[in-house]
Image (tube, rainbow, N blue to C red):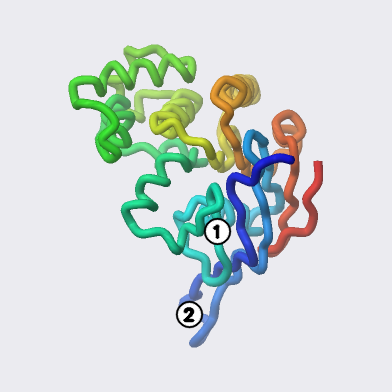
Amino acid sequence: MATILAEGKHLSKTFPVKGQGKGAALHAVSGVDLAVYEGETLALVGESGCGKSTLGRLLLGLLPPTQGQVFFDGQDLAALPPARLRALRRQMQLVFQDTAAALNPRWTVGQSLAEPLRIHNLCPRGEYAARGAALLTQVGLAPDLLDRYPHQLSGGQRQRVGLARALALSPRLVVCDEPVSALDVSVQAQMLNLLADLQRAQGLTYVLISHDLGVVRHSADRVCVMFLGRVCEVGP
């Protein structure tokens, strides 16, 4: 049987709403049970505002659930001491939808790729440039982009840099939040093929958040349909 890598049990997340009276809240995710199996691509689909991105962040532990539990590799994220959770974060990464906002505009590509290596103390400072060049090559970019700034890159290049930054820590689970929605159709195909190649080569597990059912049909093993914060259906 397939191994469960990440799992949400009875997950709910509410956000306070200002100006709507005392106690007003937005129920972004409501009572969700969902398992992500190792090595698969699970797509989260649904209309804008249905809770897809919030659920993705809950599964990564980037948002604390209002109710419920999140497990990664059988470990309850809320029960882990800070040092253990920090170490576990290396195995869970996020590729953001907004390629311009995801990268610090004052940092070069090389600095952005070096940051996760520095935070997790993965290699000496003198090796940052070589590791960055190798990561760029891995996602199909030229190493000479290390000295460029985000505004000097195309949208497709920025998205690949975001993917390279996520891969810097050799994760097991990558949540891709609308990874191709802002790209031209030809660049979309290149990005999707790259994700598939990396998955085969590294055994990655993806949660793919998308509203484009053509992208989902091309990439996903299973589909989870959401509506108003709830899971309506999960199937192949």
Q: Can residue 120 be seen in this view?
A: yes
Furthest residue to the front? 1
Image location of residue 207, percent across then percent down: 61, 42
Image location of residue 93, percent across then percent down: 47, 41
Question: Residue 119: which quarter of the image?
Answer: top left
Instruction: Please name the residue shown 26% across and 30% down the image.
Output: 111
Q: Can residue 158 be seen in this view?
A: no
Instruction: Please name the residue shown 51% across and 84% down the image.
Output: 23
Q: Compare marks 2 and 1 and give the one earlier in the sequence.
A: 2
Q: Report the quarter where the C terminus lies.
A: top right
Residue 152, numbered label: none
Question: Residue 181: which quarter of the image?
Answer: top right
Image location of residue 89, percent across then percent down: 41, 45
Packing grade of label 1 (10 A; few <14, some 14-19, many >=20) is many
Q: Which amino acid does label 1 sit on?
A: Val
Q: What residue type is labelled 2?
A: Gly
Packing grade of label 2 (10 A; few <14, some 14-19, many >=20) is few
Question: Residue 81: which quarter of the image?
Answer: bottom left
Which of 169 and 139 lies nearest the eye of the viewer?
A: 169
- Residue that badge 2 annotates: 19
Left or right side of 138 for 68: right
Instruction: Please name the residue shown 59% across and 33% down the image.
Output: 180
Q: Is residue 28 above or below residue 84?
A: below
- Residue that badge 1 annotates: 70
Image location of residue 18, percent across then percent down: 46, 77
Q: Is mark 1 on a helix, strand or loop?
A: strand
Q: In this view, does 5 lie above or below 156?
A: below
Q: What element carries label 2?
A: loop
Instruction: Please name the residue shown 59% across and 40% down the image.
Output: 178
Left or right side of 223 for 229: left
